[in-house]
Image (cartoon, rainbow, N blue to C red):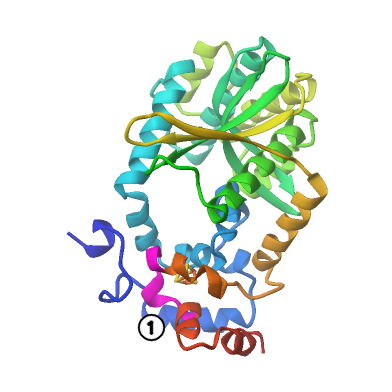
Amino acid sequence: MDRAAGGTLAAGSEPGPGPSPARKRKRKRDLSGRSPMERCCRRYLKVTEVCGQSWCELQVLYGFEYPLVLKAEKERAEVKAGASIHLAREREVHDVVQVCVVTREDRQAVKFLNLLGMISALQTGCCVRELPAIGMLEGVFMVGVIDELRYSDKGELVLNELKTRRHKSLPSEAQAKGHRLQVGLYKLLFDGMVRGSLSRDQVVEHLELRLERALGPGVLEHARNLGFRVAAFGDVLDLLLVNLKYCELPCIDLLRLEYCHQGSGDIVGSQDVPFDEDQLRAQLRHYLSFWFGQREPRGVDIEDAWKCRMCSYAEHCEWRRGSSQGSVTVHTDKKLK
Ligand code: SF4
């Protein structure tokens, strides 16, 4: 089996599936010109990518530069175990049906049809899981999936984000920081959607979709079964935007993180997350300034060097090399010249 697909690379092991010398030269050339957003050909960012920056920004960038390593990461047993726990929970509240999709517009239409169903469910006071959340935040189109929205006994709309844990313990502050950012960004996206701020142009431009693209037979049948009469992708998008505008759903009142043990499924603990919009947006602007090319990416601070021991990119990492030679600051300054 190819090493890249076989597992996580350890620090000090043989070089893995890194970029070719030609690609490395290209990266150097690009560093002088295009922003990371342009270099990685991104028109939108995932919430999880921005949250990954709170752990290590350079690690997120390496994920784009070493896609095979990233793929191997996603194949890891604990990542798969976490995904199956999420799927099992989703099945508790939704029927999961297979829909045959052919085009990118088909795939997005299915997500939007699901979202339409979830808007109705929330309007009737039901709990929904795996709700897609999209919108513009601080000049960047962002996408994410909210684990769960439900109403509390007091009628508050509660966002509950499930995190699976290998050990029966709550996460370290380094991990929890990213989790808090994640739920805060989900709230901004959801609140924006139900306030009607999402526009047709934003969706089409950033997700690069064609409004006139006819939907495939599988999607048409799925839409019919849900009671929607649509023909092209633009019909589904318009339906969604009108429903969001007039749904009168409340904004999210409470953010909660729930930690669950992977092996037993036991709940390890839960934490309510305070929401300070100004602080959150300032934090987001800082992370986005890297994507806009306004500053260099940062590796971990010296006191967080323990993170590098469990990092799949450790052997390729320029920051770590500089750090182990006791010259993180020198290295950073050199890059900024
Ligand atoms: Fe970040 Fe350390 Fe990994 Fe480099 S080795 S990408 S600094 S976590």
Is residue 316 magenta-colored? yes
Q: Is residue 100 visible?
A: no
Badge 1 element: helix
Q: Work out whether 322 lies above or below 101.
A: below
Q: Main secondary structure of the magenta part?
A: helix
View extreme (right): residue:
278
- Residue type at numbered disc 1: Pro
Which residue is at 49% across, 16% downward? 93
Residue 309: x, y in percent?
A: 39, 68
View extreme (front): residue:
169
Instruction: Give the camera-side residue of 169 and 52.
Output: 169
The answer to whether residue 222 is left or right of residue 293 is left
> In which quadrant of the rendered image does the N terminus lie?
bottom left
Q: Is residue 266 visible?
A: yes
* Stretch in magenta: 309-318
Is residue 87 magenta-colored? no
Q: Work out whether 326 lies above or below 81.
A: below
Q: Work out whether 67 lies above or below 198.
A: below
